[in-house]
Image (spheres, grey):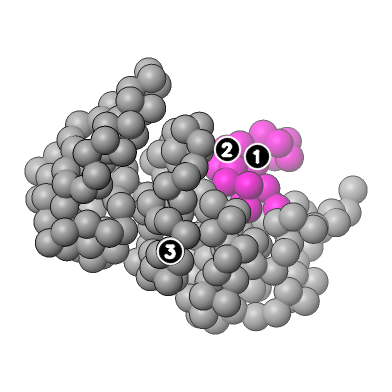
Amino acid sequence: MITVLLADDHAPFRSGLRAVLDTQDDIACVAETADGDQAVEQTVRLRPDVAVLDVRMPRRNGLAAARAILAMPGNRTRIVVLTTFDTDDYVREAVTAGARGFLLKSMPPEELIAAVRIAARGDVLIDPSVVRRNLTRFADALTPVETPADIARLTAREREVLHLLSGALSNPEIARRLHVGEQTIKTHVSSILRKLGLRDRTHAVAYAHISGFATNATLDR
């Protein structure tokens, strides 16, 4: 069971999020909060698998709450950040903080469900429209980030893995898709990060979208 904390100061919207998640047998909302301080306090107390945080909240905004949660010793809670079109400047901060989901509040219900599941397993879901609106900001957040031509450093199989990784597939899912062992995929992911100079899977996913590789990749067969 995936346990979730919801933090949003707009009670009707928060209730709507809970109603969506409550339809799923494998997800349980364990707490709702209306501000960032409460989100941090409840996360310390309950240790949910995923915390869904609105950016704009009183007392402590969602990004500050995310940083506090992720800095906790032994923290295992993954963060999904909710944003709106007029808060695009916060997306870079969310990437830097280590959030595992970046969603617009206009998302369809199935996207929230997918984001919670993807974050819980340690992977990343980035709303494509957020990426399109924030290419420069994402690029600034990726340190170091090189040019799309650096994709040529990857082997054909590594390009396949990166393409599947950009679609938020887990290592076991990629392994099944490519008919290889999970350890082989872990080795490929490590090689991709090293060759492209990226820090982790989050930055690899963002890089794939920023460079256009996620949507324009031509893979060797």
**Label 1 Cα neighbours within 10 Å, binned few <14 / some 14-19 / many ≥20:** some
Q: Residue furthest right?
A: 221
Image position, residue 68 (x, y; %): 20, 63
Which corner quadrant holds the N terminus?
top left
Residue at image coords 59%, 43%: 169
Q: Which mark is drawn over residue 86? A: 3
**Residues under labels 2 and 1: Cα distance?**
5 Å
Instruction: Tell me if residue 5 can be seen.
Output: no
Answer left or right for 198 relative to 150.
left
The image quadrant of residue 10 is top left
Q: Report crowding for label 2: few under 14, some 14 to 19, many 20 or more residues within 10 A (C-alpha).
A: some
Q: Nearer the viewer, mark 3 or mark 1?
A: 3
Above/below status of 169 relative to 197: above
- Residue flagged by tag 2: what amino acid is it? Pro
| Residue 60 appearing in the image | yes
Q: Which mark is residue 172?
A: 2
Q: Secondary structure at mark 3?
A: helix
- Amino acid carrying label 1: it is Ala
Q: Nearer the viewer, residue 121 or 22?
A: 22
* Magenta span of residues: 163-183
- Mark sitting earlier along the chain (2/3): 3
Are there few (<14), some (14-19), or many (20+) residues within 10 Å of tag 3? few
Q: Secondary structure at mark 1?
A: helix
Residue 170 to residue 128: above or below: above
The mark lying in front, picked from 2 and 3, is 3
Residue at image position (49%, 64%) is 200
Q: Which mark is residue 32?
A: none
Disc on the earlier residue, 3 or 1: 3
Q: Residue tagged by mark 1?
A: 175
Which residue is nearer to you in this view: 187 or 41?
Answer: 41
**Residue beneath the point at 80% across and 57% down:** 217
The secondary structure that most of the magenta stretch takes on is: helix
